[in-house]
Image (cartoon, helix red, strand yellow):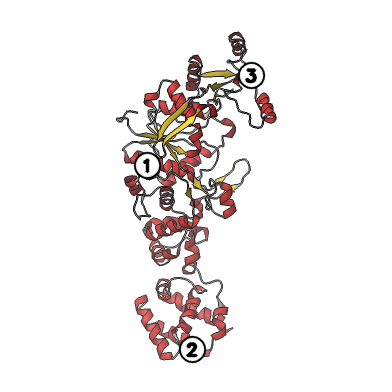
Amino acid sequence: MSSQKKVRVRFAPSPTGGLHLGGVRTALFNYLFAKQHGGEFILRIEDTDQTRFVPGAEEYINECLAWCGILPDESPSNPGAFGPYRQSERKPSYRQYAEQLIAAGHAYYAFDTSEELDALRQSQPNFRYAQENRMSLRNSLSLSAEETQRLLDANAPHTIRIKMPEDHIVSFDDMIRGRVSFETKLVDDKVLLKADGMPTYHLAVVVDDKAMEISHVFRGEEWLPSAPVHLLLWEYLGWSDDMPQWAHLPLILKPDGNGKLSKRDGDRLGFPVYAMNWTDAKTGDLTKGFRELGFLPEAFVNMLGVLGWNDGTEQEIFTLSELVEKFSVERINKSGAKFDFEKAKWFNHEWIKKMDNTALLPLVREGLVQHGVSAIEDSSITTILSVVKERMTYVSDFWAQASFFFQMPQHYDVDAVKPKWNADKTKFFEEILVEFEDQDWQASVLEPFFKERVQSSGMKIGELMMPFRIMLVGGKFGPDVFLIAEILGKDQVINRVNVALDVFNS
């Protein structure tokens, strides 16, 4: 590959369902590499398998990438000079290359019906269409030229398959794994063009990468077994000099490290594996996503960026621009990365703490509206955020941590108070309520005032602080109690103490 070639990378998902976090990480690594080298990041929709096409999936992919902030420079919705960006719209371009391969002796027509092949798979457990049996099957290699032409003239259904060479070694230099080699005798004759005229992934990916001038291919290691087919197609089509550099990314593994992380693992262990909620159009089943759980996109991207990559330092928190600056292929691990949901939650907690309160405001307000709270000023919400965000793992935790600021406690932890409640404590609170009326209402004033009154009463601070907290919030939780009092305001605190005294004394 020419060293002068402009960096152009692509993320090429199939519109068949939700976007697995492994897919998002592939998109992210493509994006980071492109941006670092002043190149372009392309979204191409690989929808050649019409039987698996799911309505709404392409829109979902667009929304996921937008949420993550990894926006394509070219895509179906933002076309550039290399369109169309959906493979189904490029259909006319594929057949000519398949025919070119046949003319050069590198591919052949296969007339076997799917029923015939299914029967062979039933009778031969390890059946594959390959060099050891291709001459005994119905194809243009085993049939005469006349019979082949007759079938073609009669529009007999057929596929076009690559003719894998015998006893050949195909090698390439992977940017992550180094030198990788394959024996062609172990690879079957993959279908390149299906009976409906649509290309398979193998043909389409090569033709499209050439047409779109893709310089580097970052894709999951599950595509490694297909690499020899793709390398040979680049060679057979006469495009070896334009072939991209390859980087096969390690898998994201189950938390115990045994095998690739799947949606079922998330269902079983209780965490999402999709970026956003996905509802299956056929079954109506909802698969939960990180966004709806209350993850910030910055935290999600940060977590994925360091899943199988590090910059060689102890740094763990990265903005997207820092990832662009520091990303290097050399520091991508060759082995799979275990997914750790507790660590993912840690990233989100750190990002919530780090995030400016005004940036969190719209997300938090969304949650408040769901709980019937809307007429609250922005300044009040940001003040409350500043005292509770240290306790939030998810954005959606705001209500659990702060609901008492917006409504009276619905219940009181009476069991924590009642055993030691007495007339002296009732008298203390009745008296301090009168004195509250004349107090400056800041936590810095209220705390020493309250503690001095406790001391002069002869009681212990803990005996009165806990009931005071429960009076204001309903339970033994929440931030500093005097900060809570300051934010609630004098009238609200006096009201709540009076209501709670009635409950405690009933």
Q: Which residue is mark 2?
A: 427
Residue at the spot of label 1: 329
Q: CA distance from mark 3 to mark 2?
A: 100 Å
Inspect the image, locate mark 2, and give the three-letter code of the amino acid beneath it.
Answer: Lys
Residue highlighted by disc 3: 136
Is 69 rendered above or below residue 86?
below
The residue under label 1 is which amino acid type? Answer: Val
Q: Residue at 48% x, 29% y: name it.
A: 228
Image coordinates of residue 209 in percent, x first then y, are 42, 29
Mark sitting earlier along the chain (3/2): 3
Q: Is residue 82 left or right of residue 466?
A: left
Residue type highlighted by circle 3: Ser
Q: Is residue 88 visible?
A: no
In the rendered image, residue 323, in percent from the top left (x then y), is placed at: 35, 47
Label 1, residues with CA under 10 Å away: few <14, some 14-19, many ≥20 = some
Is residue 31 placed above or below 437 in the rendered structure? above
Q: Nearer the viewer, mark 3 or mark 2?
A: 3
